[in-house]
Image (tube, rainbow, N blue to C red):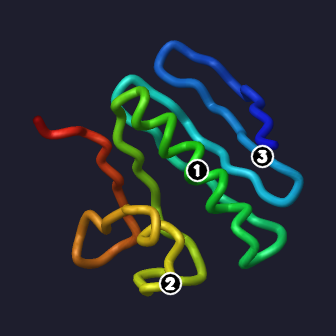
């Protein structure tokens, strides 16, 4: 079960945490994008972080907003990267900046 907690609401953004018993994801939702601030799983390789990431991806699709983040994972620029598995792309040839677009092209 995923639980939602609103940390802060200001005019430009909502800072939220979604968590289950073994992982959490901290996101900021603004008018122009969703920023993943932190994704942490206390138990590795069980799919807990992926479950939360899929939840945020579904929110981004509903709101028609891209997701941005800096890849600080242990698998930076590696094929086993959780973000690459979920459709994120590196923005630049070097650096940790990633994006996942959720715009449907007609």
Which residue carries the number 3 mark? 19
Relative to 11, say whether 16 is above or below.
below
Which numbered disc flags the more N-terminal residue, 2 or 1? 1
Quarter of the rendering containing residue 92 = bottom left
Image location of residue 78, percent across then percent down: 44, 86
Relative to 45, say whether 39 is above or below.
above
Q: What element carries label 2?
A: loop
Whether label 1 touches label 3, CB < 8 Å: no
Which residue carries the number 1 mark? 37
Is 22 positioned to the left or the right of 84 in the image? right
Is 38 positioned to the left or the right of 97 in the image? right
> Which residue is at 75% across, 73% downward?
46
Which numbered disc flags the more N-terminal residue, 2 or 3? 3
Image location of residue 24, percent across then percent down: 75, 52
Which residue carries the number 2 mark? 80
Q: Distance between the residues labelled 2 and 1?
A: 20 Å
View extreme (right): residue? 21
For disc 1, the neighbor class at 10 Å (few under 14, some 14 to 19, many from 20) is: some
Q: Distance between the residues labelled 1 and 3?
A: 14 Å
Numbered label attached to residue 53:
none
Of marks 2 and 1, the one in the foreground = 2
Quarter of the figure with the C terminus: top left
> Which residue is at 56% across, 51% downward?
54
């Amino acid at each position: 079960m995923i639980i939602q907690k609103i940390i802060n609401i200001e005019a430009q953004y909502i800072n939220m945490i979604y968590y289950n018993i073994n992982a959490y994801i901290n996101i900021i939702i603004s008018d122009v994008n969703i920023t993943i601030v932190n994704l942490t799983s206390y138990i590795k390789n069980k799919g807990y972080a992926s479950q939360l990431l899929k939840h945020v991806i579904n929110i981004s699709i509903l709101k028609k907003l891209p997701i941005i983040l800096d890849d600080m994972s242990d698998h930076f620029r590696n094929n086993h990267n959780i973000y690459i598995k979920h459709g994120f792309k590196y923005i630049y040839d070097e650096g940790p900046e990633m994006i996942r677009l959720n715009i449907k092209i007609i």
